């Protein structure tokens, strides 16, 4: 455990964080470049709000929890200033993307831009307690809650009344975001929200028959036999399960922990590619051809979120099965995603584990899943080691 | 040539068309099933307007040009009745998809639904000259023209004024649709439209420096160095080149033919996977990582459209290079996409030519590219054979 812990810590602090620190800062216009090639060279200058906000969160979190390094604080502030100035429209909705200089490119159709912005300013406030950050985080969070039943607003393309499915992603993110913003919310809000999001994740979207989490269900949780209704994303479910583990720890809910461990292991068993290794991106729960052409690709975030789940599940439950899976997923992930010659990891492999896109960052991959995953695993493994040392 | 011609004809009439005739008709609710597994079993019942309309067109066209078989007429009418009853909203805009029984699922955000509907009713009118078909085709065509500068209407997610790119797909489809509807349009409309769409395809979207057609450009045709601006789809460009060949034949424009042949061959040279064979789905003209994760997959329609281009280009130009490419693409396509054991072809291969989804039809693959491609190639090769026989 100790050697694993060291591995994750050093990879984070000696290779991954320096990469983003050195390569991503846009000193001309503010914000971060995220479209970086294998060596860190910028190949596109658009600014994607998900990734801008996640990077602010990342550097704030590291400053708070690892070390108060001035350059980490400066990096977080650098992205936050750009987000504050250009990120949202007049109504406090965050755009999806901007040009390098901050002109809005894609409208605020995507509520996750708002989720990650709230998360960013919530974390920044912890290390730099300016009232404006707290206000922005809280206002954005309220806006998310008010938009949550129709997250795409006027950009919704489904016809209301025919097949009114709701998506897993939002309750899943809210289950994490509520804890992330706990220091800014009053106790009553948290106490009201948490049981609801846990219920959504663990009952409404969880399908007893298959033992899996579905991506889209009817409002009452019933199954829709359609492309959307049959869709499951193992990585999404596994990420949600570690959010549940965090909630179970925070609120001392042992039953929730047990259920999260079980669903996570069942998901992994189901989503693991028994022929080539790695975890599928999307699957159809009835085994029909998924609509998404990238369904069998192996994505970095899926594997990192799985490692976080397994490390936490092992830390909290001591389950041997979690440890065995951890070693198996660790081996696959480090072997296939890590770039031995240049820092940061590859993001996209094909089914066979071959590199599919040679980028280190892009429209969807930024300074987030790799460093957050390395940090979380490092912490869990260190907990286990120190518990053993003192036990 | 004669043996190739026979191969395409028999594949069309003995295997592919019978498959759709037997497996796709929804006798309970009308319209067609298109989500068919390897053997033709229905795995999803949603009705996608693109595919409903394209199948009406397909059976109408075969009835007109190949043989007046009553079951083909009945099949075309069967789909048309469903489309007429459920396909569009109160303003004559066609939905994107419906449930099995015809309830609207996805709003009319996609103008290609309208394009294929107009094409369907235009073709049906040729074999079943009911005034309502002509009216519907013309009205839909006018609606397309009125929507063409903002095809997604209120569902447009890009912010106006920042990076106002226009897409290649619409002018490309219009270049085919105008000829498809020529019997319904007055000469003046055609004479006004045709030079415009040719100019769009061959000058505005054609980029001299690279010799390629871009998917998105600024209104004046200039290049946008962005994910969308750098995107090129070889299959799209090759399909457009055979539309241009058809226009060059119709209007006796030899220069257009020469240019279309050259662009098509350049595109093929660029888009061909030199390592594993087959034509890439998407590429980035600057060689950066494309945004689309399916970029290196090999899709059925890309290969069929390429074969149509090559057969026509060889028929019209006699170019030896076209013939050599035809044999090469023919070999790859028949070897990898054709299912030796069951009728109809696979649609989705990975980069290495392995079957990626075992379906014969889905949300995007219906009774269209395979049979249209087989028909077009058969016709071109037969022309060449008979010209040789009489020459």
Image (tube, coloured by chain):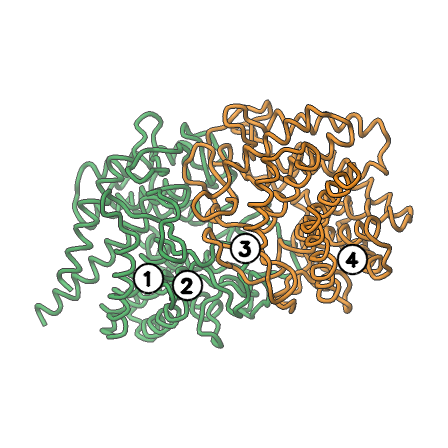
Chain colours: A green, B orange
**Circle 2 sits on which residue?**
A234
Mark 2 Cα-neighbour bin, 10 Å: few <14, some 14–19, many ≥20? many
Q: Is circle 1 on the same chain as circle 3?
A: no
The reply to whether the C-beta atoms of the residues labelled 1 and 2 are less than 8 Å apart is yes
Q: Is residue A137 above or below residue A213?
A: above
| Element assignment for label 1 | helix
Which of discs 3 and 2 lies nearer the camera? The answer is 3
The reply to whether the C-beta atoms of the residues labelled 1 and 3 are less than 8 Å apart is no
The chain under label 4 reads B
Mark 3 Cα-neighbour bin, 10 Å: few <14, some 14–19, many ≥20? many
Q: Pinpoint residue B320: horizontal percent, then vertical percent.
A: 61, 35
**Circle 4 sits on which residue?**
B79
Quadrant location of residue B165? top right
CA distance for labels 4 and 3: 26 Å
The chain under label 3 reads B
In depth, the one of A310 and A315 nearer the eye is A310
CA distance for labels 1 and 3: 29 Å
Mark 4 Cα-neighbour bin, 10 Å: few <14, some 14–19, many ≥20? many
Q: Is residue B155 left or right of residue A210?
A: right
Which of discs 1 and 4 lies nearer the camera? The answer is 4
Q: Quadrant of the C terminus of chain B?
A: top right
Please name the residue shown 50% across and 68% down the image. A285
| Element assignment for label 4 | helix
Q: Is circle 2 on the same chain as circle 4?
A: no
**Circle 1 sits on which residue?**
A306
**Circle 3 sits on which residue?**
B348
CA distance for labels 2 and 4: 38 Å
């Amino acid at each position: 455990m100790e050697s694993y812990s060291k591995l994750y810590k050093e990879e984070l602090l000696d290779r991954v964080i320096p990469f983003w620190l050195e390569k991503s800062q846009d000193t001309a216009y503010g914000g971060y470049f995220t479209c970086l090639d294998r060596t860190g060279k910028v190949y596109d200058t658009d600014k994607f709000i998900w990734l801008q906000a996640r990077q602010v969160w990342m550097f704030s979190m590291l400053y708070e929890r690892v070390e108060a390094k001035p350059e980490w604080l400066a990096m977080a502030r650098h992205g936050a200033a750009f987000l504050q100035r250009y990120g949202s429209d007049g109504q406090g909705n965050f755009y999806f993307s901007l040009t390098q200089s901050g002109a809005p490119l894609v409208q605020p159709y995507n509520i996750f831009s708002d989720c990650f912005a709230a998360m960013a300013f919530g974390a920044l406030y912890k290390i730099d307690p300016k009232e404006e950050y707290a206000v922005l985080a809280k206002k954005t969070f309220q806006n998310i809650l008010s938009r949550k039943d129709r997250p795409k607003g006027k950009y919704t393309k489904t016809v209301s009344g025919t097949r009114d499915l709701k998506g897993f992603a939002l309750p899943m993110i809210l289950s994490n975001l509520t804890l992330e913003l706990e220091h800014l919310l009053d106790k009553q809000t948290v106490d009201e929200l948490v049981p609801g999001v846990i219920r959504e994740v663990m009952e409404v979207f969880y399908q007893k028959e298959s033992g899996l989490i579905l991506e889209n269900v009817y409002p009452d949780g019933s199954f829709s036999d359609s492309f959307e209704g049959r869709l499951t994303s193992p990585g999404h479910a596994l990420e949600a399960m570690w959010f549940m583990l965090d909630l179970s720890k925070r609120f001392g809910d042992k039953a929730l922990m047990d259920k999260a461990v079980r669903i996570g292991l069942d998901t992994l068993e189901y989503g693991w590619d028994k022929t080539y290794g790695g975890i599928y991106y999307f699957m159809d729960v009835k085994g029909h051809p998924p609509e998404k052409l990238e369904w069998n690709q192996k994505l970095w975030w899926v594997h990192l979120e799985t490692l976080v789940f397994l490390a936490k599940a092992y830390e909290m439950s001591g389950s041997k099965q979690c440890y065995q899976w951890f070693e198996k997923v660790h081996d696959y992930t480090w072997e296939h995603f890590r770039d031995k010659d240049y820092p940061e990891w590859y993001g996209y492999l094909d089914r066979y584990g071959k590199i599919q896109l040679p980028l280190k960052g892009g429209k969807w991959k930024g300074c987030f899943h790799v460093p957050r995953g390395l940090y979380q695993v490092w912490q869990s493994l260190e907990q286990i080691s120190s518990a053993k040392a003192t036990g």
